[in-house]
Amino acid sequence: MSDATATIAPPRPAASDRLKFYGIWIATALVLLVLPKLFSSGGSLTTFSLIGISIIFSLSYNILLGQTGMLSFGHAVYYGLGGFLAIHAINIIAKNKFAIPLPLVPLVGGAAGLLFAMLLGWVSTRRSGTAFAMISLGVAELVASSALILRTFFGGEAGVSANRTKVLRLFDWSFGPQIQIYYLVAAWTLIAVIAMYALTRTPLGRMCNAVRDNPERVQFVGYDPHIIRYIAFCFSGLFAGIAGALAAINFEIANSAYLGAVQSGTVLFATYIGGVGFFIGPIVGAIFVTLLSLGLSDLTQVWQLYFGLIFIAVVMFAPGGITGLLMMHRPLLKGGTLSRVLPSYLLAFIPTLAMVTGLMLAIETIVHYTVNPNEDSHIKAFGVPFDAANPAIWAVAGVLLIGGFIIARKTWARVAASWDDALTAAREKGVAA
Amino acid sequence: MLELIVISTLNGILFGMLLFLMASGLTVIFSMLGVLNFAHASFYMLGAFFGFQISRWFGFWPALIIAPLLAGGLGALVERFGLRQVHKNGHVAELLFTFGLAFAIEEIVQIIWGKSPVDFRVPPLLDFPAFTIFSTNYPAFKMFMLLVSVIIFIGLLLVLKRTRIGLIVQAALTHPHMVGHLGHNVGRIFMLVFGVGTALAAVAGVIAGPALVTQSNMAGLLGPILFVVVVVGGLGSLPGAFIASLLIGLIQTFAVSMDGSLAGAFGPLSPDYAATWLSDIWNVTIAQIAPIMPYLLLVLILIFRPMGLLGTRDT
Amino acid sequence: MRKLALIASIALPMLGGTAMAQETVKIGYIDPLSGGGASVGEGGLKTFQFLAEELNAKGGILGKKVEIVPLDNKTNPQESLIQAQKAIDSGVRYLTQGNGSSVAGALTDFVTKYNERNPGKEVLYFNYAAVDPVLTNEKCSFYHFRWDASSDIKMEALTNYMKTTPSIKKVYLINQDYSFGQSVRTQARAMLKTKRADVEIVGDELHPLLKITDFAPYIAKIKASGADSVVTGNWGQDIALLLKAAADAGLKVNWYTYYAGGAGGPTAIKQTGLNHQVFQITEGFANIDHKTSADFEKTFRAKVNLSLWYPRAVNEMRMFAAAAEKAKSLEPVKVAQALEDAKFEVFNGGDGVMRKDDHQFFQPIYISSFGERTEKEPFDEENTGWGWKLAAKVDTKDTMLPTTCKMERP
């Protein structure tokens, strides 16, 4: 964990690395520009917009979890309040014909997130660890419940809606079509990502890491961990508010679901699954979880089961998240010994795939028999049609599952062995070099 | 007035005991292993469904014994093959593991028992009103629930304080290495604690199932209230959880019986403010906000007394 | 590697697939198919699929096969909008939804805005169960049609029934604290005042939505008030737990409910033993003495293994087919115009009309009670042995309520 987290705020790069560094940002911007040309349907644009929003939200959460070591169960509070304020802002702007274009509305959301983080954060950041987590849980329940009581502001259960096209137009952009919203979200995502990255490299960012790792020593060097946690919390609220405002602009509605436990849980999931130890981790996690939650329910009826199993698998086998898993290969790549582990991966991949296929087949056939026993047994799951009544399918599922499991266990042991070899070799080379 | 006070007190105690029944297993797991077990409610649900199924085959009383044993066994397996692996990656990993588990259990229950509520009934032996106060009946089943809660409370307390196993468990939590060196199997102790915790959740499920609605969403609907009980009571304190349950039960029940609002106390708001958020606050009754009071209590307790009511260590 | 493949397999069908080949009439069914509301959403899906098969057996609509596209919204308004967008991408021009007024509000909004911004690609929204009166009043839309009676209409029917029932003297209102529960309570107060001024409202309670596990304190209050009837819009576990607590405490009142017949409701009532004390207000139920609907119910139960909760869904699909035939087109705007003021012999018999002013369907409303059956009630519910028995029928003309809708037409 510790050498993984050390890379959150990397040391200042050498001049040659700088080109590479700025190159990455420019490349990202280009990709964001070109993406809608490749996938132009309304659904994919909505998906991209949601991913962008989720990236900002997850990164803001990682300021707490990954960088300052604070586990929050109520981050959606700031996201949701940002969303509500943004919706009200759009309505007020449209009503009074203020000269404020839509792209500036996320600032309102950010301000709201910041303000409420400042208000609610002072007491809760006095404590860390489980106490902080539990306070955040309590605060989240209180705010979510009051959303249903304070009807005039939160619009009750139905929420508050707005029409984003009624705001002042800029360059003849009405912001009606999804493509324009996509560019708005993309621009804000880029700005927010750069800002949050910059934040990790300030002295404050470093002090946050120190507070996470050893608050006593932070006190010894003369800082107050409470203040540092509080400032980090405020920044986190600010960016969560921006994300919430973008979501409100995208859906043109804000309601109590924005503030709820599901939203808070999802961001925790996305961040952790992506990997809290790396700046890029939450971005990967946001993409992965958004795609999963949007797409999985189309592929199978029992998507929640797969959702749960995937998370269990990631937590068990990739504790550093997806990014952590990939970053493990960096020393090998640098040492040039990556090729030594690849064959064992390939070897392990086949039985593992067989095991997963067998499991999926077994789940789908069982589901067919218990949930829809009267329907046609020719079912389709994950786009693949098969006959659930066919005993051969049952046999195949059983063989794949059990056989795959037995062989996969052996092959993964081999992977571990060859991994150790490769790492040792890479280290030796590193020493030699 | 007297009627309302007596009835509310009784209802509050009964509800508090139901809460304690549900939360006792979580106290054991949370305060001893430090695991924020978000799947606790799922084991409670599993208990209810196991109880339903077994009571169909053998009747309610065997179900009350077998269902918790089954669920406890499952819990022990989860600890042995899941949580133990995750344990080294810290509390957040453990918590997410239980999150994922909760998802999976809910869907598995749906696959087996469907999405609609099942017909889980109170056993005929207890299906009569135990006594009547102010013409309100109190069913015998609720008295039984109260009894089970108290038995569990006293039983757990005795086991932890008075028996050798209890002492070893307590020692293993603070000094696992020392206990290991003394020749005890710490891994097995943790597995045991987790198994007992989930079995207690299942006991609550078997008893609450007929009294409430046995449905695949019952775990989700329970929400985080159990964590409130454990934290307010104080980590590591069984009596604390007991008192916190009673406190929350009584607060909520009495709040429900009060119709007071700011408008009632100070007269209606001037019509100028009729459509503002102020009027929302002005007109909300105490009864309406009763269910969020536990969370208010949670926040206040953590701010002013972070170790909880009877806790001995900081959360 | 495996993850990449997984991501690709998930992402690809979402990003591609804009085939617009209209060989079938696709109806996007947006309702919860997972999570807390799944039991209700699944029942609705099976109903619509059954109705689609029925239409297809008769040659479909204008010769095209009807296909129901299930879309899981997890009872979340935002998720519903994403699903709607996805459905539209895959060539769906008709959406149907029912569970949750918040979802319905978001969807009407979305559909109206979408149609404004994409002329020529209009989408219609058929609402089969969201009863918030706002949808056909302040927030009414040309593209929204409602087949269920709004909660105001149901209350109108209920109070018209109460007018003729002098035994009701003291009424207690208990409702969930959100828009629907609020509208039930305000309408009950207003309508009872004009129709039965002598009825005393002895209590008016709001409790949080789906958060109460113990209703005993509420029952204690009802008991203390001396009420003889309780009116409640509660649904899901809130109605089941409320009735259980009442039975436990030995409370003897009549329950006038909106949703006691929902999934799990009959099971709960049977458990409480409240024989013919629980009433519900619906646009139809199984034991109405009407030959064709009874036959339909029989085949439906045999096939789907559920009782028909949504007679209104039958009305919806049949009227949709009739309107498309009348307009000789499947263009949503033309279908919408054909639906306006369409008259229809409803599923359980009687006249129905889709009012042009607000796109609200008006139909006879029934009040029935749940309990032991005689030979007049052939159907039971959820294998409890008990069934719904007719208490009163309120004719279509007695359900007509004025609307404040000012509809903008294309």
Image: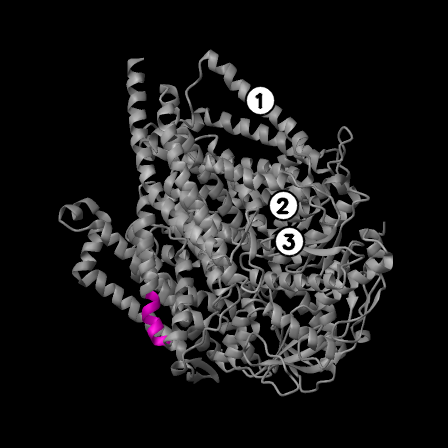
Labels 1 and 3 touching (C-beta < 8 A): no
Let me know if residue B67 is in the magenta part. Answer: yes
The secondary structure type at the circle numbered 1 is helix
* Mark drawn on residue A371: none
Labels 2 and 3 touching (C-beta < 8 A): no
Depth-wise, is mark 2 or mark 3 nearer the camera? 2
Q: Nearer the viewer, residue C205 or C58?
A: C58
Can residue A180 be seen? yes
The secondary structure type at the circle numbered 2 is helix
Report how far apart the C-alphas of labels 1 and 3 lie in the structure: 47 Å
B98 vs A284, left or right, is: left
Label 2 is placed on what type of residue?
A: Phe
- The residue wearing badge 2 is A84
Q: Position of residue B216 (x, y in %)?
A: 49, 62
Report how far apart the C-alphas of labels 2 and 1 lie in the structure: 34 Å
In the image, the segment drawn in magenta is B60-68
Q: Residue furthest left?
A: B182
Q: Residue at x 42, y 84 (%)?
A: B128
Label 1 is placed on what type of residue?
A: Ala
Q: Position of residue C238 (x, y in %)?
A: 55, 68
Depth-wise, is mark 1 or mark 3 nearer the camera? 1
Q: Position of residue A370 (x, y in %)?
A: 50, 62
Can residue C158 be seen? no
Depth-wise, is mark 2 or mark 1 nearer the camera? 1
- The residue wearing badge 3 is B277
Q: Nearer the viewer, residue A172 or A342?
A: A342
- The residue wearing badge 1 is A27
Let me know if residue A236 is in the magenta part. Answer: no
